[in-house]
Amino acid sequence: MTYQKESANQTKSLRERQLLIGQARSEIVQAIKLAPSIGRYWASYAWLVGSSGDYDKATCLFNQALKLDLYNPAIGELRDRMEELKSFKEQ
């Protein structure tokens, strides 16, 4: 996603990255409100939430994404990567 690439760009200031993440959060929440049955929106929101450290909420959001789009391998892979990140940070 564009916001992930941009917010990871180390040439941007911390404030710029925080603004990008806030904008992304707003856009994803709006997308979910407009089309709550699209699993990839829930998965994007889950990744954003998990990236900020709220792994429990991210797990719930990923579960919702998978309920909506069970056969989308990208959602499951993204969830697995989030679990790896969580495990790594807990060490």
Image: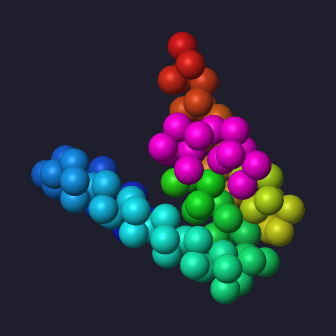
84 to 3, vertically: above or below = above
Whether residue 52 is in magenta: the answer is: yes
52 to 65, vertically: above or below = above
Residue at 51% x, 23% y: name it.
Answer: 89
Query: Left or right of 73: which side holds 85?
Result: left
Q: Position of residue 4 (x, y in %)?
A: 39, 58
**Quadrant in which residue 7 is drawn:** bottom left
Q: Which residues are magenta?
A: 49-61
Query: Left or right of 4: which side holds 57?
Result: right
Q: Position of residue 22 (x, y in %)?
A: 40, 62
Q: Nearer the viewer, residue 67 or 29?
A: 29
The C terminus lies in quadrant: top right
Q: Kindly tell me whether residue 74 is visible in this rendering.
A: no
Q: Position of residue 3 (x, y in %)?
A: 38, 64
Residue at 63% x, 70% y: name it.
Answer: 41
Whether residue 34 is in magenta: the answer is: no
Residue at 49% x, 75% y: name it.
Answer: 27
Residue at 86% x, 62% y: name it.
Answer: 67
60 to 82, vertically: above or below = below
Q: Nearer the viewer, residue 9 or 34?
A: 34
Q: Position of residue 80 (x, y in %)?
A: 67, 41
Return the residue found at the far bottom: 34
Q: Please, what is the dominant secondary structure of the magenta stretch?
A: helix
